[in-house]
Amino acid sequence: MNQYDEVCLNYFLEHQTQLFREEVASTQEEAEEFLEDCLAVVCGSLAEVKEYLDESGADVADMSLKEIEEASEVFSLPDGRYLVVEV
């Protein structure tokens, strides 16, 4: 496993239906492959998430950090980081 650690992969596996109607992965390996294909990123704070989304062309200028945290593509990891999965 490279960019995505166990915390990230396990959380995505458990919460993937937050973004998708059905599961897209069932193992850590499948989750890692899927996240790599989506170019998902891990950010250390909501401010970093907002900056990343802004730089990738999303219209987040008027969104609060709370609204960003509640977005379906933003996964709040249990260790305080955020996984952003854009599809």
Image (cartoon, helix red, strand yellow):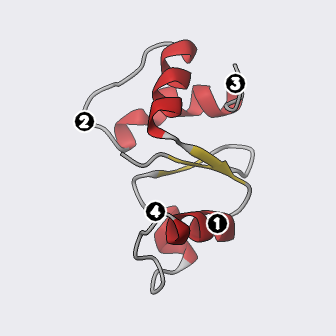
Secondary structure of the residue carrying tag 3 is: helix
Q: How crowded is mark 1: few (under 14 residues within 10 Å), some or many (20 or more)?
A: some
Q: Name the residue under label 2.
A: 21
Provide the residue designation for mark 3: 6
Name the amino acid type tagged 4. Glu
Q: Quadrant of residue 72?
A: bottom left
Mark 3 and mark 2 residues within 8 Å of each other at the beta carbon: no
User: Which residue extends farthest left?
Assistant: 21
Viewport quadrant of the C terminus: top left
Identify the secondary structure beneath mark 2: loop
Q: How crowded is mark 3: few (under 14 residues within 10 Å), some or many (20 or more)?
A: few
| Secondary element at image label 4 | loop
Q: Is residue 46 above or below residue 83?
A: below
Mark with earlier residue (3, 2): 3
The residues bearing labels 3 and 4 have C-alpha atoms spaced at a distance of 23 Å
Q: Earlier in the sequence, mark 2 or mark 1?
A: 2
The three-letter amino acid code for the residue at tag 2 is Arg
Marks 4 and 1, how far apart in space?
Answer: 11 Å
